[in-house]
Image (cartoon, rainbow, N blue to C red):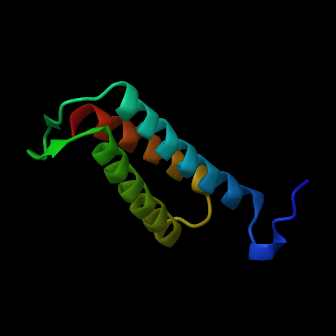
């Protein structure tokens, strides 16, 4: 196994950053292979897949911070809420 102690990382932290990096790579490949026209959603601004990904990641960070502050460390339920939020952003924004 890899030693993550050089940066005081835990495996969940490393998995989180690998997931974000993977999402960025996947969305870059999608943008190159399948270019899209920006669309207007409920925010009335033009957004692309990358814009919606950014809005999702930013909103998810705030959801998790709020969850930690109000509920505590039971983060799996916050993940479910973030997935619902992500689906709504990609559908309607």
Q: Quadrant of the C terminus?
A: top left
The image shows residue 79 at horizontal and vertical percentages of: 53, 48
Q: Which is nearer the eye, 31 or 69?
A: 31
The image shows residue 48 at horizontal and vertical percentages of: 25, 39
Relative to 24, residue 92 above or below: above
The image shows residue 62 at horizontal and vertical percentages of: 40, 63
The image shows residue 15 at horizontal and vertical percentages of: 68, 52
**Residue drawn at (41%, 53%), measured in percent from left and top?**
57
**Residue drawn at (28%, 47%), measured in percent from left and top?**
51
**Residue drawn at (13%, 47%), measured in percent from left and top?**
43
- Apparent side of residue 77 relative to residue 30 in the rendered image (left or right): right
- Apparent side of residue 15 relative to residue 58 in the rendered image (left or right): right
**Residue drawn at (62%, 64%), measured in percent from left and top?**
73
Q: Which is nearer the eye, 24 or 86?
A: 24
Residue 35 picture quarter: top left
Direction top: furthest residue: 34
Q: Which is nearer the eye, 7 or 30?
A: 30
- Apparent side of residue 93 relative to residue 67 in the rendered image (left or right): left
């Amino acid at each position: 196994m890899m030693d993550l102690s050089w940066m005081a990382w835990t495996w969940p932290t490393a998995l989180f950053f690998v997931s974000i990096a993977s999402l960025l790579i996947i969305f870059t490949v999608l943008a190159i292979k399948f270019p899209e026209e920006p669309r207007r959603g409920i925010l009335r601004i033009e957004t692309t897949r990358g814009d919606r990904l950014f809005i999702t990641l930013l909103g998810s960070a705030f959801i998790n911070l709020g969850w930690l502050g109000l509920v505590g460390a039971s983060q799996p339920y916050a993940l479910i809420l973030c997935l619902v939020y992500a689906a709504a952003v990609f559908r309607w924004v």
